[in-house]
C-alpha cells in the first residue's frame, strides 16, 4: 500500500482556522505534513519545523500552494530535543505572529528493538525527542498561547499505549509518558484556557512506517487484515482528528486521547475468531 497523496483542490475546506496561527513540530513529512496541508487549506497561518534543512525546504515548497504562495507559512529549522532551539523557535514565532492559537507536538522518532538490543544512546535519543522534546515544546510556547488568551495543544502519542509490542519497550514507554502528560497538563493549564489532548495513531503509512516495516505487499496486507476496517491508515486520517482537536469545535474536550487506528486496539476483525465463525453464510 502506498501513501495517499492529495492536491490542493482535494483539500478545499471551510475556513475553520481563518485568523488562527498553529505550530506543527516535525512538519516535514507524514502526519505533520498532512496536518499542515489541511490547516492551511482551512485558512490557518502555519509554522512547521524540522531538523533537516533540505527536507524543510521540500516541505515548504510542497505546502506553498495551500498557503497563498507561502504567505501563510513559516518554516523554521528546529530540533525538538534541544530546549535552546525551542527558545529560538518561540522567539521567531513571537516576532512574526505575536501569539499561537494551537500547537501540534508531533516531532518524534521510532526505534523498534527487543529490550536486549537497546543501547543507552538509543534510550536517550528516544526519550530526548519523544518525551523531553514534547514537554519543552509546550513549555516554551505557553507565553504565545497565553497571548492568544488560550488555545489547544495536541500531542502525537501512539496505539502502542494500549497493546504491548515486543519490539517497542522504550518507544512505547515514551508515548505512554506523553499520553499522561496530556492529562496532567490539561489540568494544569485549564485555568489559562488551554486545552491539551493527544491522538494515538495505529498503523499509519508514513516515512517512519516504511523505515520500520518491510516493503513487502504481503506484510502490508497482513497488517491491514489485523485492522477491523481492513486497511492501513493514511496520514490524512490522523490530520482530520488533529484538526478537530485544534479547532473551536472541540472547545469542551480536554485531557482526552483519540485513537485513530481503524479499530486495531479495541476490536477483532470479522473472521479472526469468535461466535461469527460458527455461523452459516
Image: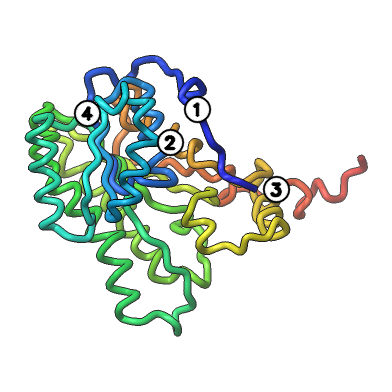
**How far from the left and from the top, in percent, is residue 214?**
61, 64
Mark 2 and mark 4 lie on one chain; the one further toward the N terminus is: 4
Mark 1 and mark 4 lie on one chain; the one further toward the N terminus is: 1
For label 3, the SS is loop
Residue 247 to residue 194: above or below: above
Q: Please report the residue visible at 52 percent of the width from the left and 56 percent of the height from the top.
A: 209
Looking at the rendering, in which quadrant would you find the C terminus? top right
**How far from the left and from the top, in percent, is residue 67?**
32, 25
96 or 265, which is in the foreground?
96
Q: Are marks 2 and 4 in contact (CB under 8 Å)?
A: no
Alpha-carbon distance for marks 4 and 3?
A: 40 Å
Q: Which mark is residue 269?
A: 3
Query: What residue did someone put label 1 on?
Result: 7
Query: What residue did someone put label 4 on?
Result: 21
Alpha-carbon distance for marks 2 and 4?
A: 16 Å
Q: Please report the residue visible at 40 percent of the width from the left and 80 percent of the height from the top.
A: 118
Q: Which mark is residue 239?
A: 2
Amino acid at each position: 500500500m502506498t501513501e495517499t497523496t492529495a492536491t490542493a483542490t482535494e483539500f478545499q475546506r471551510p475556513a475553520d482556522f481563518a485568523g488562527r496561527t498553529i505550530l506543527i513540530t516535525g512538519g516535514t513529512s507524514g502526519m505533520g505534513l498532512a496536518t499542515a496541508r489541511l490547516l492551511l487549506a482551512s485558512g490557518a497561518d502555519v509554522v512547521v519545523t524540522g531538523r533537516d534543512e533540505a527536507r524543510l525546504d521540500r516541505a515548504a515548497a510542497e505546502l506553498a500552494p495551500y498557503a497563498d504562495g507561502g504567505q501563510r507559512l513559516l518554516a523554521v529549522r528546529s530540533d525538538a530535543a534541544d530546549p535552546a532551539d525551542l527558545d529560538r523557535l518561540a522567539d521567531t514565532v513571537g516576532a512574526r505572529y505575536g501569539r499561537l492559537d494551537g500547537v501540534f507536538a508531533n516531532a518524534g522518532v521510532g526505534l523498534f528493538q527487543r529490550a536486549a538490543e537497546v543501547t543507552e544512546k538509543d534510550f536517550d535519543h528516544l526519550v530526548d525527542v519523544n518525551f523531553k522534546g514534547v514537554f519543552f515544546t509546550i513549555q516554551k510556547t505557553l507565553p504565545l498561547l497565553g497571548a492568544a488568551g488560550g488555545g489547544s495543544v495536541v500531542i502525537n502519542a501512539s496505539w502502542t499505549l494500549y497493546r504491548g509490542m515486543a519490539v517497542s519497550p522504550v518507544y512505547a514507554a515514551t508515548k505512554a509518558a506523553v499520553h499522561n502528560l496530556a492529562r496532567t497538563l490539561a489540568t494544569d493549564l485549564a485555568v489559562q484556557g488551554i486545552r491539551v489532548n493527544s491522538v494515538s495513531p495505529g498503523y499509519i503509512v508514513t516515512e517512519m512506517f516504511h523505515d520500520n516495516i518491510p516493503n513487502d505487499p504481503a506484510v502490508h496486507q497482513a497488517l491491514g487484515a489485523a485492522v477491523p476496517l481492513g486497511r492501513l491508515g493514511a496520514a490524512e486520517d490522523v490530520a482530520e482528528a488533529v484538526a478537530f482537536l485544534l479547532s473551536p469545535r472541540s472547545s469542551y474536550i480536554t485531557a482526552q486521547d483519540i485513537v485513530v487506528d481503524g479499530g486495531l486496539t479495541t476490536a477483532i476483525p470479522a473472521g479472526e475468531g469468535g461466535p461469527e465463525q460458527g455461523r452459516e453464510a
